[in-house]
Image: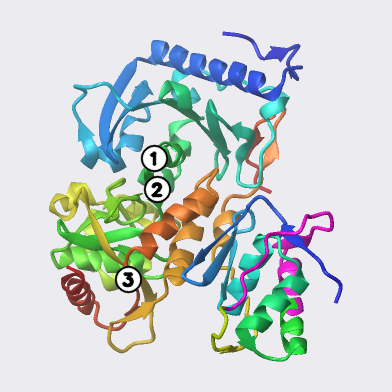
Amino acid sequence: MNSRRFRSANPNLVSEIIDGEAVIVNLEKGLYYSLAKSGAEIWDALQAGASDTDIVDVLLTRYSADRTVIEAAVADLIRQLKEEGVIVENPGAAPGPSLPGAAAGSEKLPFECPALQKYTDLESILMLDPIHEVDETGWPSAKPAS
Amino acid sequence: MRSTRQGGRVRSLPLDAPAAQACYFDDVFAAFLNAERLAGSIARDFLIGGGRIRVRFAGDALVSLLSRALAHLSCDASAEPDLTICVWDSASTGVALPDAPATIRQFLARREMSGVSGERFIAAFDFAERMRLSVLYRQQRAAIHWIPDAPSIPFYEQAAPFLQILHWWAREHRHQIVHAAAVGTAAGGVLIGGKSGSGKSTTTLTCLKAGLRSPGDDYTLLCVAQPPLVRSLYSTGKLEGPHLLRSLPSLMPAVSNQDRMHRDKAVLFLHEHYPEALIGEFPVRAVVLPRISAGGRCRLIETSPAAAVAAIAPSTMIQLRWSGSEDLRRIAAVVRAVPNYILELGDDLDEIPVLIRGLLEKAA
């Protein structure tokens, strides 16, 4: 597995981790997403500049699953986030800070593959605000009814 | 006033962006002063989020349209305002909006004027249905709101006037506008979140009928304090017309736009018909997310703070220009501080206020 780092794809993307769940909002498209449990941990680590291999190593200290299972889960979530236009690869990024692993002696948790929940119910708000033509003065103006 | 046209074409100023912005927004302010000189000045003062907001209208064409939703917060003009919003329209005053140099005629995805969110200015150009300009002059404690003409003001702007300007001003004063309702008593209440059609207004208006009070049904102001407060902003309630007729027919006489309910939501100015139902503020004791269910009884189900943030923050932020990470954090901070519930709306709406009262008693 080649190590890759990522960054937010768009300044109109904002996110917050709330009690272990991530909420990601794409203000430009009117979409938002949520990620729970390991998904929120992966998102948090991606935001901190961790590489995909770093993330797999840390998850292995926290969860009881084979490396291949966790590698596949991390790769799949990253693929979905890229397809959704949430993150892009950031090849020139400096390594992020070390991720904290599980406390010594703590019991490993059962691993559940992260599920990216996508919500599209706000798209219609933006569709009510269509892009209009720009008139000769440079200001937008309503398109004439066709 | 400095001309911005040469030979009938908009000039491209060879200035750096901040200088071009300053010149242009000086021109916009001068245009307002000219409109005010020609049409006369009418001022209205309001107490919003602990601050005094003065709205200065050039002429009378917009006064009732843009002050009705704030009338419950009106106050005398005995003190200097914290913010003065200057408003004019071109049709009634004959004063056009100055043409903009090319450097600021670029718009971002949400109609923000590209680059105009700095130390001196925040601006956005909305063009849903008809265009309108909002600018906050941060260092002058002043703002401009311009629209082409009174008839072009859409119903949702009459229900929530100066939304963008008040959003920018409020967040500099420890407040956050949220797309959320609230009901309760002076001792405390619940913030009600959810997208349009989730049952938010049904929950609010049903609770008001049962004697609870509300600081607002559509947009409210959150004060990030300990405990967090929700404060009144607009007195409006909005409901889908067919739903109102079916579920809450007794409210029909209070609908202000009965002739347009076939295309717009029904708008109620609560202070005009139910002044006792409005309350200035109360502490937030819980967040409730209504959800229309397939029959059965109404019930409360505990949910996560993330679910509450997801129900409130995106719909708020998408409608507020120049919103971003800070807005999300402020909303999350309030939601984290209280318990969060889904309210399943069953067949008998009278159960809703009973559940809310029970929740408030438990949280007290």
Residue at the disc numbered 1: B170
Q: How many marks?
A: 3
Residue at the disc numbered 3: B339
Residue at the disc numbered 2: B176
Place residue A134 in its image quadrant: top right
Amino acid type of disc 2?
A: Gln
In the image: residue A88, left or right of residue A103: right
Tell me residue A22's x, y (percent). Answer: 55, 68
Place residue B180 in its image quadrant: bottom left
Q: Is residue B58 magenta?
A: no
Q: For the residues tagged 2 and 1, is the chain the same? A: yes
Provide the chain ID for the residue under circle 2: B
Tell me residue A121's x, y (percent). Answer: 54, 67
Residue shown at the point (66%, 79%) measured from the top left: A59
Amino acid type of disc 1?
A: Ala
Span colored in magenta:
A75-102
